[in-house]
Image (tube, rainbow, N blue to C red):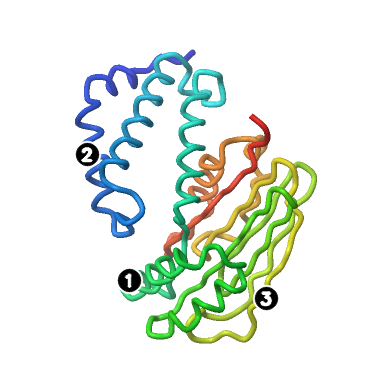
Amino acid sequence: MAKTRIPEILTKYQDELLADWVRMQLAAPNRRPDLISEQELRRESREFLDSFRQAARDGDVGDVSAGPWNKVRETLAGLSRSRARLGFNPADGLGHGLEAAEAAIQAVETFESTSALAPAAILELLHPVLRHTRGAAVAVADIDLDQRVLRFAGLGNISGGVFSARHSHQMVSHNGTLGHEVRKIQEFRYPWPERGLLIMHSDGLSRRSDPHSYPGLPARHPGLIAGVLYRDLRRADDDAAIVAVKDMGEA
């Protein structure tokens, strides 16, 4: 097992690290105080740091798939589920800068009140709302675990795919800009496989976002999958967003 001073550093500077990390999250431009309070954010951040420090102390930082890292993976999975239930979701405003951010924020805020609707219906409602903005590329996916079906509707340069050990499906997103040019909004249905993996990303990443290009990667935590694809496939001259959702199966 590789030796590391990470547990020692985390223990010695835990309060400073937590304070700096929380301060950065509170200052983030996409911060949503209406969805998560500062107290809850601080609690979740401390929980993650505690589990990370313990895993680094008891396990090997070079093998995060080993048993000592189970608590870290469980914590991340819980946070992912919590964020999904609260309605955190990405939207890519057209272009760059403040006007693009305004369009993305407007799309996300409207989504909060429409998330119970079908994907195509959500896009239909978002279209007039975004008319006064620069417009946005938006995609919505809904996974029905009981029926094993994924419903998807997208407009603009949003790529998506459903992956499993045996098959993969690239999802269809129509051309256009929500809020301005919309020729067709259409909902598609795809089979949701056992232990399926959904990946959606903006055009800031190359369309070659197939996790099977990395041996063993699809079996890892969705946060790690998204991080690897973002690291390797991000375009240097564009902003980017990626979402990875994975059916972890029965506990």
Numbered mark located on residue 186 in the image? 3
Percent position (x, y) of residue 118? 62, 67
In the image, residue 12 above or below residue 122: above
**Quadrant, the C terminus:** top right
Q: Is residue 219 left or right of residue 27?
A: right
Describe the element under mark 1 as helix, strand or loop. Answer: helix
Q: Count residues near mark 2 (Cα–Cα under 10 Å), then give few for <14, some for 14-19, many for 20+.
A: few
Residue identified by numbered label 1: 97
Q: Count residues near mark 1 (Cα–Cα under 10 Å), then give few for <14, some for 14-19, many for 20+.
A: few
Q: Residue furthest right?
A: 166
Amino acid carrying label 3: it is Gln
Which of the two discs, 1 and 2, labels the residue nearer the N terminus?
2
Percent position (x, y) of residue 35? 36, 54
Which of the two discs, 3 and 2, labels the residue nearer the N terminus?
2
Amino acid carrying label 2: it is Asp
Q: How many labels were placed on the picture?
A: 3
Q: Is residue 30 left or right of residue 73?
A: left
Residue identified by numbered label 2: 20
**Label 3 – label 2 distance at C-alpha:** 44 Å
Numbered mark located on residue 214 in the image? none
Q: Depth check: give the residue in front, 15 or 60.
A: 15
Q: Report which quarter residue 213 is drawn in.
A: top right
Q: Depth check: give the residue in front, 50 or 171.
A: 50
**Label 1 – label 2 distance at C-alpha:** 26 Å
Describe the element under mark 2 as helix, strand or loop. Answer: helix
In the image, residue 150 above or below residue 172: above
Describe the element under mark 3 as helix, strand or loop. Answer: loop
Which is in the foreground here, disc 3 or disc 2? 3
